[in-house]
């Protein structure tokens, strides 16, 4: 079941973010740099659209959408105004079981209903293939918050092929 997250679930989502990211075996120093990025606060949940995937009363995945009213610069990277997929994490033991696809279809339908024509995504390099399979278009590699590392920048048009 996919439902809106509640603010009191922020610790669960932060833990899920870190656990999921660790699946890729990044060096421990990266998590110190990503600490703020991976921390979900009650205010974040109240201010943005955050949806959880719950199975047997346990949250196993989530995503969040952020609407930027104007362009901003973060870590030297200019993020354009518009809708962004800020987070999408699935517990490692549930990867490959259709959970990511279900979340993707959920936000795709939400965006289509709102007539939002472009979703922007800065993805983990390991997730690029998933997003492309879902119909996202690779734009370029952008600098990461980790020096010497890049992250794929993709666009998604709700209703595009690949789903």
Image (tube, helix red, strand yellow):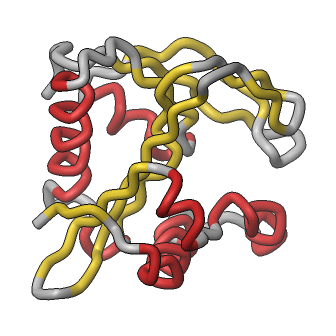
Q: How many numbered dots are placed on residues in this image?
A: 0
Horizontal and vertical percent position of residue 126: 49, 46
Name the one closer to the observer, 139 or 70. Answer: 70
Image height check: is 114 above or below 62? above
Name the one closer to the observer, 125 or 159. Answer: 159
Is residue 58 toward the left or the right of residue 149 in the image?
A: left
Image height check: is 150 above or below 60? above
Name the one closer to the observer, 120 or 145. Answer: 120
Determine the image quadrant of residue 32. Answer: bottom right
Residue located at (57% from left, 24% from top): 153
Location of the C terminus by quadrant is top left
Is residue 127 toward the left or the right of residue 159 in the image?
A: right
Horizontal and vertical percent position of residue 102: 15, 50
Residue located at (50% from left, 77% from top): 10
Determine the image quadrant of residue 62. Answer: bottom left
Horizontal and vertical percent position of residue 154: 49, 22
Is residue 32 toward the left or the right of residue 103 in the image?
A: right
Residue located at (16% from left, 32% from top): 109
């Amino acid at each position: 079941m996919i439902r809106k997250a509640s603010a009191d679930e922020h610790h669960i989502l932060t833990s899920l973010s870190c656990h999921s990211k660790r699946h890729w075996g990044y060096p421990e120093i990266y998590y110190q740099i990503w600490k703020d990025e991976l921390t979900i606060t009650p205010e974040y949940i109240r201010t943005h659209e955050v949806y959880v995937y719950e199975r047997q009363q346990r949250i196993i995945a989530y995503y969040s959408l952020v609407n930027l009213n104007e362009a901003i610069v973060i870590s030297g990277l200019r993020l354009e105004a518009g809708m962004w997929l800020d987070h999408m994490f699935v517990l490692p033991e549930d990867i490959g079981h259709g959970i990511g696809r279900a979340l993707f279809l959920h936000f795709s339908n939400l965006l289509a209903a709102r007539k939002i024509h472009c979703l922007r995504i800065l993805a983990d390099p390991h997730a690029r293939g998933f997003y492309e399979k879902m119909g996202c278009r690779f734009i370029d590699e952008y600098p990461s918050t980790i020096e010497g590392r890049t992250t794929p920048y993709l666009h998604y048009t709700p209703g595009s092929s690949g789903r």
